[in-house]
Image (cartoon, rainbow, N blue to C red):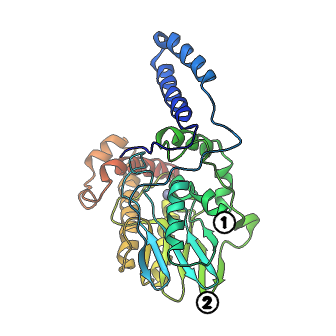
Amino acid sequence: MDKPAARGSDAPARMLRSTLRATWSLLRRAGPCAQAGATLLAALLAVAPAPAAAQPAPPAPATVAMSAQPVVEGIWFVQGESAMGSAANQNFISNAAFIVTAEGVIAIDALGSPALAERMLALIRERTRAPLRWVIVTHCHADHIYGLQAMKAAGARILAHAGCREYLASDTARLRLEASREELFPWIDETTRLVTPDQWLGEKGGEGDLLLELGGRRLRVRHAGPAHTPEDLVVFDETSGVLFTGDIVFRGRIPFVGQADSRRWIDALDRMLQWQPRILVPGHGPLSREPAQDLALTRDYLRFLRQAMGEAARNLEPFEEAYARTDWSRFAALPLFAAANRMNAYNTYLLMEHEAE
Ligand SMILES: [Zn+2]
């Protein structure tokens, strides 16, 4: 997909700096022969005009297709692509939802760039003149939070679990943002920043759960982590039976397990099954009118990983052998199997080694 041409007066400077930075890091990795080139580029970087600090250019409007899909009366969601984030898909790879009440709007997650969040805000404004009052952050992964600054600017209060406070202040989050400024340019650029939530749940041993009441809606916000992340929040609308799960449930694709505590994650899925939700809006993929099935698919995949890799770890079988011998056929047809399964299995192998100690 073409990158937008118009990006304010310092767009060429940004582009130049970004290209120079990328080339420079390539040369540095290339070894001593490239030293002279690296030095020259470093000098060029130093003189390349920096973007004007006083007047950051407004974000280029997202051009990727986005529509508000109705869930039930007063609730919509937008659905990202089932893919890894890229400049081509503009990092629209996750879902977000909004609940319209007479007293204001509640958003769940903020999408993967300020421009995407602006698009969602426009979709909200097509449906109501009520202000955006809250954004509930299901967890602090980049594709769910890089849009927060646009929602904050629209006047929303941001609510998240205290588990993500440490992450937001970490080098990991800072380096991730720096990498995204290269990989996802121009959708993520120098003006994109990490936004600190206004209200934390579960801080200093406080309540991890909250009943949020607005315009006749009663939303149960519950801490379901540590599962996919330490800070996972799920939102359950009592009236309609709609459950927003964030990345606790990946629908129709292989989950990204990362460093998750899969034992607690399985427990959280079991708890949600007991609530008997009617409709499930996941963090990725289409909504489900058969929530029990989807909760069970994620749970069964995690159980399978733990069982297969746990056995290997206990028997001191090398990961490569265990992975090659495991029969993955039950999950192999799911999207992103090739991209995610091996890493999921490896992380689970390490986790099971650790649990066995
Ligand atoms: Zn995530």
Q: Secondary structure at mark 1?
A: strand
Can residue 27 be seen?
A: yes
Q: Secondary structure at mark 2?
A: loop
Q: Position of residue 38 (x, y in %)?
A: 53, 16
* In the image, farthest residue toward the right: 204
Tell me the residue that label 1 is attached to. 158
Residue situated in front as seen by the camera: 141 or 275: 141
The amino acid type, in three-letter code, at marker 1 is Ile
Q: Position of residue 15 (x, y in %)?
A: 51, 34
The image quarter in which residue 134 lies: bottom right
Q: Position of residue 294 (x, y in %)?
A: 37, 72
Residue situated in front as seen by the camera: 29 or 266: 29
In the image, residue 259 above or below residue 108? above
The structure residue drawn at horizontal position 38% and vertical position 47%, both measured from the top left corner, is 88
Residue situated in front as seen by the camera: 297 or 60: 60
Q: Residue 216 got which mark?
A: 2
The numbered mark, 1 or 2, whose residue comes first in the sequence reads: 1
The amino acid type, in three-letter code, at marker 2 is Gly
The structure residue drawn at horizontal position 72% and vertical position 67%, both measured from the top left corner, is 199
The image quarter in which residue 129 lies: bottom right
In the image, residue 300 above or below residue 72? above
Label 1 crowd (10 A; few <14 / some 14-19 / many >=20): many
What is the total number of numbered labels drawn onto the structure image? 2
The structure residue drawn at horizontal position 46% and vertical position 10%, both measured from the top left corner, is 33
